Image (cartoon, rainbow, N blue to C red):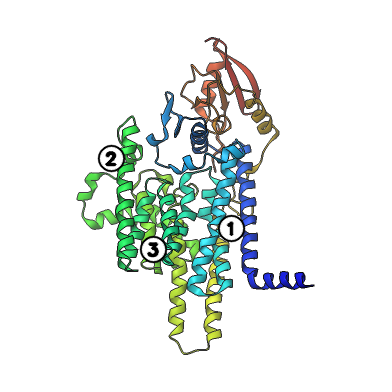
């Protein structure tokens, strides 16, 4: 009897944590499931294969290395997502690329914990904190980050949220740990941490820790972007800077001579930019714009995306809003806290004030649900490209055929096929090594969201290989082809 009473008391006292745990488990299961389905349907791509091979190589003594166009290269030639090295032990548990998809889903799910804690700290209501957890989970931008392959920068979402929370409650040891981990997710994330340092200096008056944060984060950004990556890069510069140096309508350093009005019109308020703002802000009912000064945390990645000539960076369907989501969420939570403060100055009953806060937050959740339905990635969304979750018998059969390739053999494959083959030293992406690889694995169909059209290059290569005495076709079913080299 006493045990029963004890359990009941625990449930009554900590019911919110039971609900939070259930939500975290549900999110982790759902997104692990759909991410793996997408991979099994050969809809994952180039990024997943690079992350996977970097971790696999590190496990086998080739630290932070992967296959480039001509052979093994350092991951530093692409990005400074050093956190991949820390993930190496995951492959001691399960040596499979799907491990990363599960881990990413779990990591993003755990981001609900700092969301809950920060909301409760500001609003003092368990129910409101759980509503914001739901808003976090249903944000279509974050869901797309989760679905679209695996990226080290995706881990910045829970890490930056945790960093901010521990800074806010002044738990400096935990703050420094999460800030350090955030710096390792990608080279531009230190800019967000640097801005957090400025907020500590000027808003929270924590000058010492704020100055240390700002200086260290700024130095690491500069070192990674302008020294380390250029050192390992064949072009001796960060490859992504090419998106900012092209002529025409794209951003160019010379454009800085334009008058401020022209710069704003050309790069910040043109129709495409306004549509991008809407995609980011609509799930939050545009409330982040009221969350001053915390909204500045979105600026680093937002400005990088706006100035780029790479149009996909102004989309929420990929990983490019990973550094933006935390700032949007934080500023929204603070906006609701501002409303609470304003209501506290009005002479009405406390229960009515609390009721208004709950109504506004619930309406915000409804807006998030509507936005998720409009352009989220899961099957219940009207915009779902659900064919990417449909695993055919041909997909299963080809994956089994790929597993028969010896691990010491070199392969060159289509981007959608390569993530199934990267646990080896030499795993090239076509057109690289298509005359020297031991095996060539191809799919003649694009498997990109919104684009399942024929692949022109692969179709041409297949015709060439079929007339080539060096390679023999050893597998063909539907859209899939596998060739083996006969002559060394």
| Picture residue at 56% right of the left edge, 85% below the top | 351
Q: Is residue 417 left or right of residue 173?
A: right
- Is residue 43 visible from the viewing direction of this image? no
* Residue 259 picture location, percent across and down: 21, 55
User: Of helix, strand and loop, which one carries label 2?
Assistant: loop
Q: Name the residue under label 3.
A: 295
* Residue 258 picture location, percent across and down: 21, 51
Q: How far apart are marks 2 and 3 (CA)?
A: 31 Å
* Residue 57 picture location, percent across and down: 50, 31
| Picture residue at 52% right of the left edge, 70% below the top | 120
Q: Which residue reaches farthest right?
A: 1
Looking at the image, is mark 2 or mark 3 earlier in the sequence? Answer: 2
User: Of helix, strand and loop, which one carries label 3?
Assistant: helix
Residue closer to the observer: 392 or 440? 440
Q: Do the residues labelled 2 and 1 touch (CB within 8 Å)?
A: no
Q: Residue 69 carries which label?
A: none
Query: Where on the picture, by quarter, is residue 205?
Result: bottom left
Q: Mark 1 points at which residue?
A: 373
Quarter of the picture containing the N terminus is bottom right
Q: Do the residues labelled 1 and 3 touch (CB within 8 Å)?
A: no
Q: In this view, does 153 lie to the left or right of 137?
A: left
Residue closer to the observer: 485 or 62? 62
Q: Which of marks 2 and 3 is in front?
A: 3
Query: Dot 1: few (<14), some (14–19), or many (≥20) neighbours within 10 Å?
Result: some
> Looking at the picture, does residue 284 appear above or below residue 267?
below
> Looking at the picture, does residue 126 appear above or below residue 47?
below
Q: Name the residue under label 2.
A: 247
| Picture residue at 61% right of the left edge, 41% below the top | 38
Q: How far apart are marks 1 and 3 (CA)?
A: 25 Å
């Amino acid at each position: 009897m006493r045990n029963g009473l004890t359990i009941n008391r625990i449930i009554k006292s900590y019911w919110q944590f039971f609900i939070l745990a259930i939500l975290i488990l549900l999110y982790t299961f759902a997104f692990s499931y759909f991410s793996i389905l997408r991979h099994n349907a050969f809809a994952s791509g180039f990024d997943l294969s690079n992350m996977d091979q970097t971790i696999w190589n590190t496990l086998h003594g080739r630290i932070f290395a992967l296959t480039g166009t001509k052979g093994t290269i350092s991951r530093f030639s692409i990005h400074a997502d050093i956190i991949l090295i820390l993930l190496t032990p995951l492959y001691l548990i399960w040596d499979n690329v799907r491990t990363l998809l599960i881990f990413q889903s779990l990591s993003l799910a755990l981001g609900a914990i700092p969301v809950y804690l920060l909301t409760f700290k500001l609003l003092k209501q368990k129910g409101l904190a759980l509503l914001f957890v739901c808003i976090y989970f249903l944000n279509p931008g974050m869901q797309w980050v989760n679905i679209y392959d695996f990226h080290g920068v995706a881990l910045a979402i829970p890490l930056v949220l945790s960093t901010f929370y521990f800074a806010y409650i002044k738990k400096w040891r935990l703050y420094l740990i999460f800030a350090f981990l955030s710096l390792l997710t990608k080279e531009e994330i230190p800019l967000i941490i640097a801005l957090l340092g400025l907020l500590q200096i000027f808003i929270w008056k924590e000058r010492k820790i704020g100055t240390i944060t700002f200086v260290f984060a700024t130095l690491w950004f500069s070192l990674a972007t302008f020294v380390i990556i250029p050192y390992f890069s064949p072009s001796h510069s960060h490859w992504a800077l090419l998106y900012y140096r092209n002529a025409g309508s794209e951003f160019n350093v010379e454009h800085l001579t334009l008058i401020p009005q022209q710069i704003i019109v050309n790069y910040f308020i043109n129709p495409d930019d306004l549509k991008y703002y809407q995609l980011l802000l609509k799930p939050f009912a545009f409330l982040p714009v009221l969350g001053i000064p915390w909204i500045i945390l979105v600026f680093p990645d937002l400005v990088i995306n706006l100035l780029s000539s790479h149009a996909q960076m102004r989309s929420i369907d990929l990983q490019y809003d990973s550094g933006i989501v935390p700032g949007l969420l934080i500023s929204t939570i603070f906006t609701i806290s501002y409303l609470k403060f304003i209501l506290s100055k009005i002479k009405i009953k406390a229960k009515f004030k609390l009721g208004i806060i709950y109504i506004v937050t619930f309406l915000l959740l409804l807006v998030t649900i509507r936005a998720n339905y409009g352009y989220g990635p899961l099957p219940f969304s009207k915009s779902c490209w659900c064919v990417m979750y449909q695993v055919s018998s041909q997909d299963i059969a080809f994956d089994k055929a790929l597993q028969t390739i010896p691990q010491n053999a070199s392969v060159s494959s289509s981007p959608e096929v390569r993530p199934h083959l990267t646990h080896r030293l030499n795993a090239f992406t076509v057109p690289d090594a298509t005359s020297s690889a031991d095996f060539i694995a191809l799919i003649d169909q694009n498997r990109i969201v919104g684009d399942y059209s024929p692949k022109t290059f692969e179709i041409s290569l297949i015709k060439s290989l079929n007339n080539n005495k060096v390679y023999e076709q050893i597998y063909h079913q539907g859209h899939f082809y596998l060739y083996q080299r006969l002559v060394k």
